[in-house]
Image (cartoon, grey):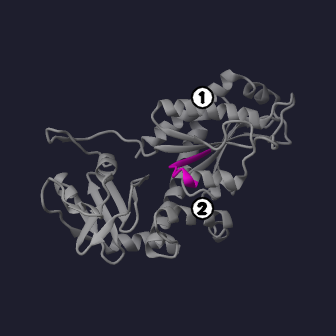
Amino acid sequence: MKKFMLSFVLIGFLVWMGGCASVPLTHNMGQGISLQEICKKYSIYWQFDSVTQVVLLEVKSHKAKAVVGSPVVFIGQEKITLDGPLRRVNSSIYVPEDFESKVIGSLGLVQSNLGYSGEISNLKVRTIILDPGHGGKDPGAKGYSGVKEKDVVLDIGKRLKSLLTQSGIKVVMTRDNDEFISLNGRTEMATKANADLFVSIHANSNPARRTEGIEVYYAKTHEKRDLDEDQRQKNEKNFLRNLDADRGSTVGAIVADMMYQLKICESSKLAMRIVHDCSAAVETPNRGARHARYFVVRNTLMPAILVETGFLTNKKEEKRLNTKEYRQKLAESIARSILTYASSS
């Protein structure tokens, strides 16, 4: 609750400030480009709170939020990492060289050589971690005829990667062959890749052999035991270390709070979309989007889901999951859902 209230307290402190000067943009040696001048160039109003160091930019219905001392910028539900942190020099704010291309473009504005500014489309997801479950010494679930979960989900993952890559999204696989990757290692890969989304692919099992359908899991809330878990703390420290911030500092605490709120909200949205769309596309029961404490969904920092693509313990679903045609159909449906989510506000 304290973290939840912090965001509202910060926004309550924000006060309006305006932009000044004109192009060409002024560079402060070693500090970056003047934020005031960028805002003037694009007619953007911006807010700054000198106490919390929070900067807020607003263009039409788009809002960008950042903290002086951090390179992370949040635009709605999208997280952008700049080449360096925002800096404050006396009464001026300076941003890295890539601020204009990454942030201004994502706010829906682009300026042509003729000086015309128009809206552009944008995906809020740019990098995805695809996590085919199990692998190597860990076969996962097994079907009646011996079909192994690790093989099924790796094939679906590769097909999904191909589809998403073709759509312009960068995809990082936790594994692209039959190897064992620890749960800790999977979450650490996601942190190092600075991913916007974590999607784990699995196949289900159940003692009740008639059980069938698709389920999608996500972390709905974080209890103190989850926030204090060793692996999550390690991933958070590594992430903040890359931003030259510390979890105990004001900047680190604000950035961590932003990411926490983003994860909870967005994970549930994507989970509900995929389970609805995918179950309809492959004509199998929709078993719902469910809250769970699976290791990879609770210890990743970004929005994360775990997709159970079907039950290998059900003869009918095992037979379907063992065909390349059905796996392709599953991959296409999941990809469509991700792209629809990624283009939504």
- Asked if residue 247 is positioned above or below residue 142 in the image, the reply reads below
Q: Amino acid at mark 1?
A: Ala
Q: Given this view, does label 2 or label 1 mark the residue nearer the observer? A: 2
Q: Could you tell me residue 24's position as x and y percent?
A: 15, 53
Question: Which residues lie in the magenta part?
Answer: 191-199
Q: Amino acid at mark 2?
A: Asn
Under circle 1, the secondary element is helix
Q: Could you tell me residue 167's position as x and y percent?
A: 46, 32
Identify the residue position indicated by label 2 in the image.
235
* Near-viewer residue (258 or 112): 112
In the displayed orientation, state which residue is furthest to the front. Answer: 29
Query: In the visual, does 162 lie left or right of 97?
Result: right
Query: In the visual, does 201 lie left or right of 247?
Result: right
* Near-viewer residue (316 or 177): 177
Q: Could you tell me residue 20's position as x and y percent?
A: 14, 63
Quadrant location of residue 82?
bottom left
Identify the residue position indicated by label 1 in the image.
281
Identify the residue shown where x is 81% and y is 40%. Answer: 139
